[in-house]
Image (tube, rainbow, N blue to C red):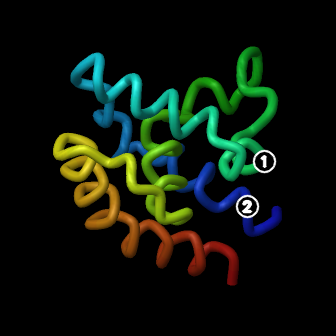
Amino acid sequence: MTYKNCPTVLACSVEYQQVKPRSNEMAAQLNKIKSDDATKELIPAKVQGTKLAEFLNMPTLYTILAYMLRMDELDASMQEDLEFILSKSTYLIDMMLQVAM
């Protein structure tokens, strides 16, 4: 596993399954993040038809990538989701490190 897979692993967490686009504007922002050149290499190329599709929450992944790449596209509702993601991420990353060691 390389460093670029860490956001994908984090986005598969059960804690983030409730994060969904709540408006058309939010969905449009997520599509903008998805199509950005900086995020293309960090998004898994093949998800459909794999085990990853069952667990991966794409809105969470796009929000994490936007935060990591310091994109300015986050509106108020996405900012709420980001704060929720960040509040759980410390615990989840700590658990991943404990399993890896």
Q: Which mark is residue 51?
A: none
Mark 2, other Cα within 10 Å: few <14 / some 14–19 / many ≥20:
few
When the figure is inspected, residue 75 is found, relative to residue 45, above or below; the finding is below
Q: Which residue is mark 2?
A: 4
Nearer-the-camera pick, 42 or 37: 37
When the figure is inspected, residue 26 is found, relative to residue 91, above or below; the finding is above
Quadrant into which the N terminus falls: bottom right
Nearer-the-camera pick, 19 or 21: 21
Mark 1, other Cα within 10 Å: few <14 / some 14–19 / many ≥20:
few
**Residue 82, quarter of picture:** bottom left
**Residue 14, quarter of picture:** top left
User: What is the x, y in percent for residue 41?
Assistant: 78, 47
User: What is the x, y in percent for residue 61?
Assistant: 52, 45
Which residue appears at 59% of the width and 78% of the height?
A: 97
Callout 1–callout 2 Cβ contact below 8 Å? yes
Q: Which mark is residue 41?
A: 1
Residue type marked 2: Lys
Q: Is residue 52 left or right of residue 7?
A: right
Label 1 to label 2: alpha-carbon separation = 8 Å
**Residue 29, quarter of picture:** top left
Which residue appears at 46% of the width and 48% of the height?
A: 13
Q: Is residue 46 left or right of residue 29?
A: right
- SS assignment at label 2: helix
